[in-house]
Amino acid sequence: NILGELGSWQSYDGALDAAQKTYETLLQRDPKSVPTMLALGSVHERKKNPADARKYYEMALTADPKNAQAALMVGALLI
């Protein structure tokens, strides 16, 4: 998906505000996308916003309770 690729490149390039907007648009189009939730969590974590990062990681974990990455990221933020 082109928006996912764009968000990845923006995040990689350090354009975190742009990546956040791209991923939010993508999540609006596909509200059940666990990879997008995880990407948004990562963006917020890099922006030093752990509360929003946790929100997206927990959304991912709720959508996919067996997702190891989501569980790991939620746990890491609790430490």
Image (cartoon, helix red, strand yellow):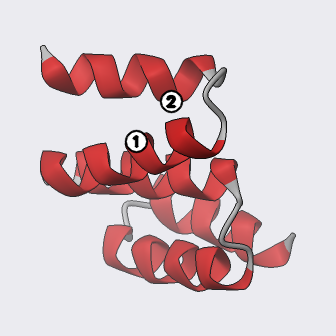
Left or right of 56: which side holds 27?
right
In this rendering, the count of numbered labels is: 2
Q: Secondary structure at mark 1?
A: helix
Give the position of the N terminus as an image quadrant.
Answer: bottom right
Of the numbered discs 1 and 2, the one sitting upstream in the chain is 1
Q: Secondary structure at mark 2?
A: helix
Return the x and y of residue 52 as percentages of the image width and height.
Answer: 23, 57
Residue 34: image tag: none
Q: Amino acid at mark 1?
A: Glu
What's the distance in space between the residues labelled 1 and 2, CA to CA? Answer: 7 Å
Give the position of the C terminus as an image quadrant.
Answer: top left
Q: Is residue 41 above or below residue 28?
A: above
| Crowd around label 2: few <14 · some 14–19 · many ≥20 (10 Å) | many
Marks 1 and 2: CB-CB under 8 Å? yes
Q: Is residue 8 above or below residue 66?
A: below
Return the x and y of residue 15 as percentages of the image width and height.
Answer: 38, 71
Q: Amino acid at mark 2?
A: Ala
Return the x and y of residue 61 as percentages of the image width and height.
Answer: 52, 36
Residue 58: image tag: 1
Left or right of 41: which side holds 48?
left
Residue 70: image tag: 2
| Residue lying at 61% horizontally and 74% vertically, measured from the top left | 27
Left or right of 8: which side holds 54?
left
State the residue in front, 67 or 20: 67
| Residue lying at 16% horizontally and 45% vertically, measured from the top left | 50
Q: Residue furthest right?
A: 1
Of badges 1 and 2, nearer the viewer stands 1
| Crowd around label 1: few <14 · some 14–19 · many ≥20 (10 Å) | many
| Residue lying at 37% horizontally and 55% vertically, measured from the top left | 43
